[in-house]
Amino acid sequence: MTTSTQQTHTPEPRTDVSMPDAAAPEASAPRSSERLTDLGEALRTASGGSYGPVRDLARASVPAEVMVRDQGLTMDQARDWTNGAMSSLVQYGMAGSGFPTAVGGLDDVGRSCIDFEMTAHGDLSLTVKSGVHFGLYGGAVTALGNEWHHETFLRPNLALEQIGCYAMTEFGHGSDVASLETTHTYDPETDEIVVHSPTPSATKTYIGAAARDAHVAAVYGQLHVGGESHGVHVVVVPIRDADGTPLPGVTLGDNGAKGGLAGVDNGTITFDQVRVPRTHLLNRYGGIDDEGRYVSDIDSDGKRFFTMLGTLVRGRICVAAGAATASRKALSIATRYALRRRQFTAPGHDGEVVLLDYLAHQRKLIPAIATAYAHMFAVNEVVERLQELHEMPEKDQVAQRELETRAAGLKAVITRFGNDTIQTCREACGGAGYLAENGLTVLRGDADVFATFEGDNTVLLQLVAKGLLSGYKEMWGDLDMRGMVQFAARAFGGQFVEATAARPLVERLRTAAARKGEDETLLDRGWQLAMFADRERHVLETLATRLRRHADDKDSFEAFNSAQDHVLLAARTHMDRVVLEAFVAGIEACEDEQVREVLERLCTLHALSSIDADSGWFQAHNRMSAGRAKAVVAQINELCAELRPHALELVEGLGIPEAWLNSQMLEDETAARWTPGA
């Protein structure tokens, strides 16, 4: 089946790169002060997408000292540095892009994701602190509030007069937002909402900016009006006065030192009968009228809940973009180091051998670089789709659900790849990689939590599978375990659900590959696409069949629970296909033949590496012979050797300015230009 998710045209580059602050650099600023190779610069352009000019402007205009932090700062010093850097983000126009134009924003939610991504090029504490303030808190007010909320809360947010935090997670509930215990009870006598933490497990925790800096919180809790519960809603609650003193009824705590993100003051919030005006309820999808009655255009509490969460989908897109950037940063550090570090002598070599000349080292880094490019194109697509749906005069609910599902999947797979890749890069740099001053251990600690916040990855992959099984015909969030099992039984019917509209290019490549013999197709893009699609189709169809057998079971939890391994595999294989097709589409849009040739090799390396990683499945299901699997490994090695001379250009194309890498082991030779054979 086809759906409305897939774009059939190449988006135009976004030229609306003006800044909210009149003092910010103009769009005509020089592209960058870096000394890039021609190929490296061209690769950046090819992978930049429609927001490429926005990325270029940030790289060209934001000083390195704004983006990088001294690794030796104490926790308190790091928190102070982060606050100062947030002010610079406002100055350079990297804040509030998604806010309405009426309050100083650009009404560009796609641009807001790019702002988040660009801060991740530097320090992730700054990324997360600004993301909480402008993205989560400010985004909640923007998406869930009305014009009064925008005027009242967004202007001081953008001016940093009120630091905001996003109070969703509780000690007792994280991923299960629908079961939060905090209560918002309407008092008709005073026309106020009483915010309360009824149990210790209702205490909000891990809340960024709560420990020290936040003045106001977007608090998620159960809304009660006239003795009736209407599910989770969001209320804006002041928590500190202008001097930083906690307000009456608000108890604040500090989560203290964490595994990373030293510059983010995560903390706890407990509410004891805290009263706020009724107007502080963000009421776009449900509120309380002047007569004290609950009103909403959405009848179902469940549908209203997931509609509200759906408006905040950009949070997951931002996390995916940030994690993708973190992996690119690690690969940039490790690859540049591998081009400089020499180890052991060998016949025919002048002195000791450069690390990246070893096949084992190439296998650590170059396939990961290829996947990092794949993720750049996949993030570009979802960011551009986010803005496209935002600009639609009428909301397309099916398209919105598709976007939510894809964002969930990308967040899960990219954050997993990011954590694995940063660790690989740390090891690839040996003892130097373990020194904090060289950036990788700090990056590893900072990026670690990306796998957890904005949704646990395992839970998000289950949401992807639910979206596929339901064909987006119903809100996947409304489907409990029994509902999902029954829906799969009656609606799937053994038919493969194509979760993105068929791309004509992809279909042509698949069809052409089907006419070739096995010996011809290893490097054929159509064969690679067909392998990914066939695996996804088989896994999804067998999952539906498996669930269908349990449609009448009373214990739906056990039926679903016993199939969770299958559910997660279905989600992963779907996302593998989505990412590969995004890479193919990105190459198709590239007009530079030299760059296109390099991207083609990277895409093949990414595809074959994925097939090799899952060769057991392909062989067990008769999609690939043992001999064919060995040929895939040999081809991967050959591609690594072919791409090795372009290693510097490849990491330049990943887009992290060298001055932003903040790695001491590279700084002694920042002026060195490495020849392809170095």
Image (cartoon, rainbow, N blue to C red):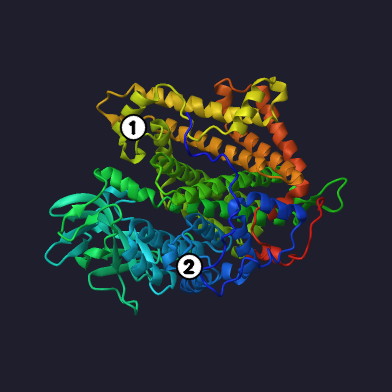
* Residue 38 makes an appearance in the image: yes
Q: Foreground mark, 1 or 2?
A: 1
- Residue 86 appears at what percent x and percent y? 49, 70
* Secondary element at tag 2: loop
Residue 187, above or below 570: below
Q: Residue furthest front?
A: 393
- Nearest the viewer among 430 and 372 is 372
Question: Is residue 497 or residue 214 the one in the foreground?
Answer: 497
Residue 457 lies in what quarter of the image? top left
Q: Dot 1: few (<14), some (14–19), or many (≥20) neighbours within 10 Å?
A: many
Neighbours of disc 2 within 10 Å: few (<14), some (14-19), many (20+): many
Residue 484 shows which numbered tag?
1
Residue 16 location, quadrant: bottom right
- In this rendering, position of residue 401 left or right of residue 656: left
Q: Which residue is mark 2?
A: 263
Q: Compared to 625, does 367 lie above or below?
A: below
CA separation, marks 1 and 2?
41 Å
Residue 164 vs 557, above or below: the answer is below
